[in-house]
Amino acid sequence: MIGLRAVRKIMWVMGVVAFLAGVTGERVLAVNPPALPVAEGKAPRAIITTKFGQMELVFFPELAPKHVESFLNLAKQGFYNGTIFHRVIPGFMIQGGDPNTKDPSKRHLYGMGGPGYNVPAEFNRISHERGIVSAARSADPNSAGSQFFIVVDKASFLDGQYTVFGEVVSGMGVADKIVSQPRDPKDNPLERIEITVDVK
């Protein structure tokens, strides 16, 4: 029969394990904090303008500094202007940022373009909830470039596998309109949804 002291010791050990899981586990957060420190004050922001309206993004430089820096630098250079949201999947996300999409004749290459360099993975504990902005990539975790996606519905199965680097703080109704557009079998919208990106 286990004594009271042994029971207390077991409970103490379990408490420590639970605490460490909460501190170090990358997938502990099922729901993101309602007010992330990075989403306040002087956090960098950008406006994505489409024919359906605007979305305002706020970025997380302390969680994914290289991804934020890359996106902002490209945006300031006008890299994203004239690209389109080339992949839309209802109940999941909308994807853009491919320079190939500036040319309608390169439709067969949509989703394959980039800035000419890769951004190494910066996986973090932020879950892929609605409104999250994350970096698109190939099978290689360190293959992110200019492409990004905006989550329109919870996609926690991506947590710890794709780099979250921002979130939409206003204009998610625009994303909802975009994701509901008619699309082809490859999830490309039938009509062009061009974007411009302005850094605030």
Image (cartoon, grey):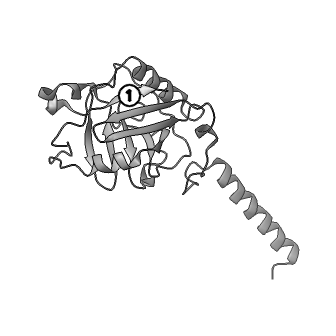
Residue 37 higher or lower than 177, as above or below: above
> Which residue is at 48% across, 29% downward?
67
Residue 18: x and y in percent read: 69, 59
> Observer-nearest residue: 199 or 110?
199
Q: Is residue 35 left or right of residue 151?
A: right
Quarter where residue 14 is shown: bottom right
Residue 92, position in %: x, y?
34, 52
Q: Where does label 1 land, which residue?
A: 197
Query: Number of numbered discs present?
Result: 1
Can residue 161 be seen from the camera position used here?
A: no
| Crowd band around label 1 with a 10 angstrom C-alpha radius: few (<14), some (14–19), many (20+) | many
Q: Residue at x 60, y 32 (%)?
A: 62
Q: Is residue 121 visible?
A: yes
- For label 1, the SS is strand
Which one is in front, 96 or 64? 96
Is 30 located above or below residue 186 in the figure? below
Residue at the limit of the structure toward the top, as seen here:
77
**In terms of image quadrants, where is residue 30?**
bottom right
Q: Residue 51: x, y in percent?
A: 27, 37
Name the amino acid, label 1.
Val
Outermost residue to the bottom = 1
Q: Position of residue 191 (x, y in %)?
A: 17, 40
Left/right of residue 100 with respect to residue 34 in the rendered view: left
Q: Residue furthest right?
A: 5
Which quadrant of the figure contains the N terminus? bottom right
Task: Tell whether 12 sits left or right of 167.
Answer: right
Q: Nearer the viewer, residue 102 or 42?
A: 42
Q: Residue at x 62, y 38 (%)?
A: 40
